[in-house]
Structures are given as structure tokens and as C-alpha cells.
Image (tube, grey):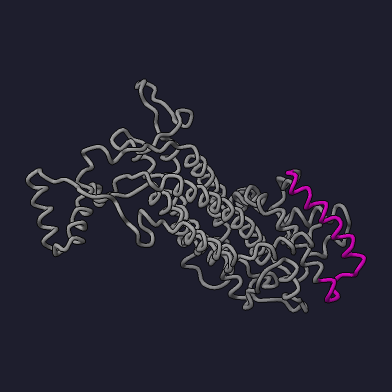
Amino acid sequence: MKLWDKGYNVDDKIDKFTVGLDREMDLFLAPYDVMGTMAHITMLESVGLLKKDELTVLLAELKNIYQETLKGNFRIEDDIEDVHSQVELMLTRRLGDIGKKVHSGRSRNDQVLLDLKLYARAEIEDVVVRMRHLFDVLQAKSEQYKNVLIPGYTHLQVAMPSSFGLWFGAYAESLADDMLMMEAAWHITNQNPLGAAAGYGSSFPLNRTMTTQLLGFEDLDYNVVYAQMGRGKTERIIGFALAAVAETVGRLAVDGCMYTSQNFGFIHLPKQMTTGSSIMPHKKNPDVFELIRAHCNKIQGMPNTIRLITGNLPSGYFRDMQITKEVFIPVFNEMKDCLDIASYAIENMEVVDGIMDDPKYKLAFSVEEVNRLANEGVPFRDAYKQVGIAIERGEFEFHGEINHTHEGSIGNLCTDKIKAKMDRVIGQFGFEKVESAIEKLTK
């Protein structure tokens, strides 16, 4: 069944190629397609395009189909083109001709726009929850190990004293800034395209404000041409937000790879979290960090792939946009897996104490010695030269203690301030409004 069927059969090869992976991808969209149809027909009844008793029957059956999608019992039949066709076919089989009325005032163009936005909105919330968990894990570790020193590096050369408190805390604050990107993506996603039809509106007296409210959107994509232009743009913007998160998590994984190596030896993973070698009996490899790194690098390429598919299209709809689903939909599970396994690895890693006692890190304290002399009245440039000469002669000794007090330093991590940053951003999403609207619509 094709919603555009005109009484002739499409060439099998053309049909297979044009449908592509849509059936597989559309299974992810199924509950959202049903949800959107519920809102749409509720609006149709309010403007006189459905009778009240028809709406009652249709909503009851759509709620049954919605439950089927949640339980994994929904499938798209082999000869059915997409999720939109499948849902309409199920309604028509079960209810007769009134099932054919649900598409009034819609096109598959705005239908899939809506499905993707509803899907992405739910997935963004899920990603945010997992980001927050990793953030909390990092902050807890930052406080737990705030007094354990490690060397800091510039140019991969030993530079100055750092600490596990700084290291864990740096990635926590990076996630707080990444959350700003996720919030921006959320607000762009959380606008209703339904009613744009094929991108030029409808002569039916649709009430787009009503469907916006029913689906818990915070606003409309008002201009119907722009609503259609949002296909690809929304996915790309979400992709940039996910890429920011992936960059943070991937960089954490790079440090994990280095810090678990024997040359560094700053952290250890439990042996149960490592893999071995087929020929080297001693190997315990941090594959978990290596694969996080690879997945996160892959995720960072997603927005550019979307751009390459849609970036040179004129206004209006083109079938090219179908391919974005294959890039966009799977990226959420990949990102969530990386967040979850990163949290698990951080929670279970062992931190090594006493690292800076090793004589090879002695020169990391040279700046501390310069600052000590400057505090005693020696001009900074003279103190720098004095310490530099001692280093060149092999006579350098550090005669003080680490005493960093300013905001964000070893002795003043500002963990509470970073948490407040994260709390402020998460408070701006408004997940509760969406959840309340969907609960009311579907239950």
C-alpha cells in the first residue's frame, strides 16, 4: 500500500531503491507517528473535519496501536512503504472508511518532520539524563581525589602540578557547557511543524496552535516553507550538540588511554574491564577507552554528513532528505552507549596516589619555586632566572608547599559553582511540560 497509489505498480527495482532503509528507520518513529496522528485528528474534529463519534473511535484504536509500538509488537509489512502508510492501513482495516480520514490537512512531508522532532525531543531528554549522570560521577570523583596530585602537561611535556580533582572536574565543567548546546538544540527541535503539509500549507482551516499545545511544543515553526526547510537543519543542529558532547567524552577517553598505560600509570582499570592479547600474556588493554574514542570521533562526523546530504538543496521537499534518517536516528544510541560506559569506567577506575613523589616529576614544581621567591620579594623575572639556572646546573630543589587558592585551582575547585551552572541549564529545558502533554494525549 502506498498513500499516493494511482492504480499502477512501480518497478520493483525502483521501489526497493526508493524505500531503502525507511521501514527499519521508521520503526523508531512509530510511537511518535501515532502520537502525532492523535493530536492531528483531535484538531480536525475541532474544526469540523471529523465527527465527534469518529474521533472517539479513532483515538481509542490509535491508543491501542500506540501500546503496540511501546511493547515492540508493531511492524511495517513488507509491501507497505513507511510507518505513515502502516498506521493508516491498520486504522482502515480495523475501523473501515473513517481510517481514511486521518490524513486530511497533512502531507507525509510534515508528518515525518513531526515524527522526527518528537523522536529527537525524547532522545535529547534521554541524552541529557545520561550526561547529568556522567557529570555527577565526575564531580564526585573530583571531590574524592581533590588532594591527589598528578603532573599537568603542555606539549605533552611535564609542566606544572595538577590534581585528579582538577582532571575529573575539568570534564564535568566541559559537560556543563556542552549542555548549553543541547539546550539550544532542544529549543529548535521543540517547535511544531505540523500543518505545513507539503511545505505550502493547506486550504483546510487547521488550528496549528492547538496541535502545538496538544503535543507539548513550546512554539510553532510558523512559516510553512521554513518548516519544510527545517528538515535536515534540525538534525544538523542536534548533530552539532551531540558532537560537542562526543568531543568531551572522546577527549576523556584519550586521557584514559594514556593514563592507564605503564608509561603514565596514573589510573588502573579492574582487570575485568580490560581485554588481553592473543600472543602477549601480560596485556591488559583499555579497549573500553579506545572504543569510546572511536565512537565519539564517528559521532563528530555526523553533522557534516547531514550537511553534505542537504546543504545544497533549494527550498521545498526533495527525496534526498530520506537518507538523513539513516545517519541521524542511530546516533542517539551510539552517544548514549558512550555516556553510559564512560560513567561506568570512571566509577570503577582505581586512582594511584603518590604519583608526584617520583623524582622525574620534580621539575613540575619549578613554577611553584619561582612564585615562592617572588612572594618573598624577589622580582618575578629575577626569580625565574634564578630557578632556571638551578635547573640547568642540576641543583633545583622545591622548598615549599602547593598553595593554590584562587577560583578553579587545585585548592579551590569550585565544584558547587560548576554544579550550579549545570543545574541552571537543565532547568531551562522544561521537560515536565512535554511529559505532561504526552501523558494527557496518549493515556
The outermost residue toward the right is 53
Q: Main secondary structure of the magenta part?
A: helix
- Which residue corresponds to the image point at 7% horizontal and 45% vertical from the top-left? 393
Task: Tell me residue 347's x, y (percent).
Answer: 50, 41
- Which residue corresponds to the image point at 29% horizontal and 51% vertical from the top-left? 402
- In the picture, measured across the screen, residue 188 lies left or right of residue 293, that is right
> Residue 210, relative to residue 164: is it above or below?
below
- Which residue corresponds to the image point at 23% horizontal and 53% vertical from the top-left? 368
- Which residue corresponds to the image point at 11% horizontal and 53% vertical from the top-left? 388
Of the pair 36 and 136, the residue shown nearer to us: 136
- Name the image quarter holding the C terminus: bottom right
Task: Tell me residue 387's x, y (percent).
Answer: 13, 53
> Residue 266, relative to residue 221: is it above or below?
above
> Visible in this render: residue 240?
no
> Visible in this render: residue 442?
yes
Of the pair 342 and 144, the residue shown nearer to us: 144
Task: Tell me residue 178's x, y (percent).
Answer: 48, 60
> Residue 428, relative to residue 325: is it above or below?
below
- In the picture, measured across the screen, residue 298 lies left or right of residue 87, that is left
The segment highlighted magenta reads 44-72
Of the pair 296 and 130, the residue shown nearer to us: 130
Residue 409 in which image quadrant: bottom left
